[in-house]
Image (cartoon, rainbow, N blue to C red):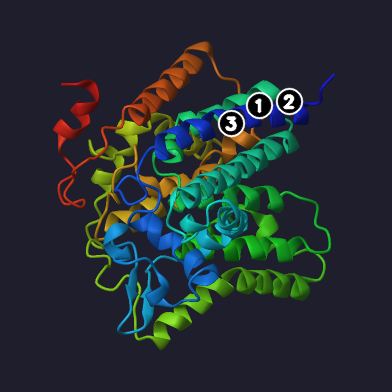
Amino acid sequence: MWSIKKKVLVFLIVVFSVNFFYSLNLNMRKPVYFYTSQMWADKAGYYMYLPATFINDWDPAKFPDSIEQKIGLGFKAEVEDDYLFTKYPPGVAVLEAPIFLIGHMLTKWFAPEKANGFTSPYQFTRILSVHLYLFLGLYCIALLCLRFGQSFYRIMAIILAIVFGTNVWYIEIWQPCMSHLYSFSLIAMLLYAIHMPKKRFYWLLIGLLLGMIGCVRIVNLVLIGLLCIGYSSVFILEGRKLRAIFHVLGGVVVGLIPQIAHSLYLRNKGLVAYEGEGFPYLLSPKLDAIFWSPTNGIIIYTPLLAAVILYVGYCFYKERKAKDLMVLVLFFAIAYLYGSWWYPTMGYCVGHRSFIDFLPIFFLPLITNTRLKIKKYAIVLIVMACLYTSYLAFHYPGFMDDEKGVNPWKWSEYLNYWNL
């Protein structure tokens, strides 16, 4: 008789295998130097640290000719001024490094002519890496469910709802090499780590995960601080408080070392990340575009996530629990932050991409509630919502034009899904 943990592991391996090979089939057919590849624009900006460090010795002259144009201006390799520039944090590259190094070694052995960091074997390693991290993130969510006494079928339902009822599946198959799935997995690991027994290196591990979260997306480290509102275990440091504080801070600093090094490099070269980008809508955030615009609205594309937030709001109204308040504050803080950004919609993603990172937290009230009874009609609605969002992800038209968030109200873009 298999234990629940073994059943969950097999289930996740099946989910991983199906989605990985489907994503691989979609993405490996595309040329590397093409706007839908996993080395284009933002994705190239996150990745460039690896070929720069392990292949080209941070020498822009060693990069392939005209690399900036070939990868959609994801980073700059200025030979005359002798600098490499990317505005994106190095955390994704740090997490991808183990698989990258294995792939690079094999490429040098079997196809040395392709060992320049920007060929199809490296695109393969990137896709494999992000799927492995997503697997680990989902496994941590499953283990957290087990810790709270959820049944195997309830765990299956939660995992399937997260993957297919939100925009996780879209980004997993179409844009896996963005930073969001890495953040998702790190935050899932953080939640699991918080609920582990407080052993010797407990707080050091918490700090290291926080540092890595910031290294992948620094804004997430700021937002994740809201986690402390609902989790007394994070800031009520039992036992030797001073040691615990130093462990957390030490872990954060270690996790942020790559980001600190990159910031010092940019400063030494007189460069500024995200220069000219800011928050012009601080006093009038584009919340409507984030919630219900036809090109990226949460309610339009991921109604299940909207329903989960409503459920959390209902729970807080009935029980006044700090954990529920934490989820609500975090959700609206993200909405306000990105609604104030110069590009509020942040590009198409079957719903706003910024919420993907924090999905483990948004689903936490469901993960921890073993007494929740879902009626049959609600199960039907949940299944329909998952099928609807998955349909939109599957039939992604390839491009959604919202004029950089200036005009997200083009219903014609949404109607393309339905051939109307």
Asked whether disc 3 touches disc 1, contact meaning CB atoms under 8 Å apart, the reply is: no
Amino acid type at circle 2 is: Lys
CA–CA distance in space, label 3 to label 1: 10 Å
Question: For residue 134, which quarter of the picture?
Answer: top right
Q: Looking at the image, which residue is at 47% across and 60% down? A: 117
Q: Is residue 17 above or below residue 43?
A: above
Q: Is residue 323 visible?
A: no
Point out the tag, 3 or 1, that comes first from the N-terminus: 1
Quadrant placement of the C terminus = top left
Amino acid type at circle 1 is: Phe
Residue 408: x and y in percent read: 19, 44
Disc 1 target residue: 11
Circle 2 Cα neighbour tier, 10 Å, few/some/many (<14 / 14–19 / ≥20) = some
Q: SS at mark 2?
A: helix
Q: Which numbered circle lies on residue 17?
A: 3
Asked whether disc 1 touches disc 2, contact meaning CB atoms under 8 Å apart, the reply is: yes
Q: Is residue 273 above or below residue 415?
A: below
Number of callouts in the render?
Answer: 3
Q: Nearer the viewer, residue 80 or 243?
A: 80
Q: Looking at the image, which residue is at 37% across and 23% down? A: 388
Amino acid type at circle 3 is: Ser
